[in-house]
Image: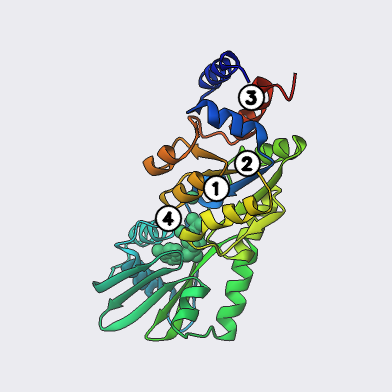
Amino acid sequence: ATPTAITVGVGRGAELGILIKSGEALEAAEKIDTVAFDKTGTLTAGEPAVTDIVGITLDDTSVLALAAAAEQNSSHPVARAIVARAEEKGVEIPETTAFETVRGKGVLATIRGDLIALGNRALLADSGIELPTNAETAVTRLEGEGRTVAILSVGGTVGGIVAVADTVKPTAMAAVSALREMGLSVMMVTGDNATTAGAIAGMIGIETVHAGVLPDAKAAEVAGLQNRGQKVAFVGDGINDAPALAQADLGIAIGGGTDVAIESGGVVLVRDDLTDVPAAIQLARKTIGRVK
Ligand code: ADP
Ligand code: MG
């Protein structure tokens, strides 16, 4: 493309709230054949709320109190949802004497001398804790409904389950169908488990899901696609997404996201409207000349 065409394309993008940081980013956008979306905060609002509390060996109030205590020092969206619900209910939150986050899995804490683990199946498996049948049944049902489940273990025994649900952004479905009509492959990459992620992907119309991807492994997922010859755009909002945004042929950062994500993207979407993803690629195609 001529320098003039690129300047025109970048200027047109700016008018639409699609900030294209360089001519290279615009040229990369024209060649994209695969769009990978982060889930939480990108396809979903990223503000989950507690939907279910299931007591196993403990009553619901104790489950919520211990879960909130364990999550007090975590900034994860799941943690914020649990603490908010405990505060809303006026539940007394016990003191935590030790606390540790396990990235992509959950938290560990010591409460009244008991070792508490709260997080996904992988966190419990790491501690050698097995789910009793009634807990397994509840977790599977909740995951099938698209909930993210935090399993509470107290001293190695599963005491209960807290489920949270996030809402799909209203523009997600239209964005995915537009990308598909443009001939692009669309996928979801998430740290959440396959069942929950699959349920949410189903609501949006995404068929390919890479689930259980630990925060540091998102960039490797993108590199894996590139090794197969795919030209990949990664769309993300969070700190965890920065390496994947940088690795992708085109990083598209959601403008409301974290500063690190915004710095790592070649394109920044000012508005929280996912249809700006197909719009950005369409703009590049028109500017560079694949579509007249
Ligand atoms: P995502 O890709 O959905 O943003 P993360 O990589 O942050 O997710 O975490 C992956 C999964 O680990 C979450 O879906 C959740 O099940 C679990 N998890 C992570 N942090 C916490 C936490 N503080 N409390 C409970 N569960 C957590
Ligand atoms: Mg995210």
Q: Do residues under tags 1 and 2 come within 8 Å of each other at their CB atoms?
A: yes
Dot 1 falls on a residue whose secondary structure is: loop
Image point 58% across, 82% down: which residue?
Answer: 134
Q: Do residues under tags 3 and 4 come within 8 Å of each other at their CB atoms?
A: no
Dot 2 falls on a residue whose secondary structure is: helix
Image point 68% across, 51% down: which residue?
Answer: 203
Percent position (x, y) of residue 110? 28, 78
Amino acid at the residue labelled 4: Pro
Dot 4 falls on a residue whose secondary structure is: helix
Residue located beneath label 1 in the image = 44
Q: Looking at the image, is mark 3 or mark 1 nearer the viewer?
A: 3
Residue located beneath label 2 in the image = 172
Percent position (x, y) of residue 152? 43, 75
Residue located beneath label 4 in the image = 77
- The answer to which of 249 and 167 lies nearer the viewer is 249
Amino acid at the residue labelled 3: Leu
Q: Is residue 30 left or right of residue 155?
A: right
Local crowd size for mark 1, using a 10 Å CA cut-off: few (<14), some (14–19), many (≥20): many
Q: Looking at the image, is mark 3 or mark 4 nearer the viewer?
A: 3
Figure quadrant of the N terminus: top right
Q: Which mark is residue 283?
A: 3
Number of numbered callouts drawn: 4
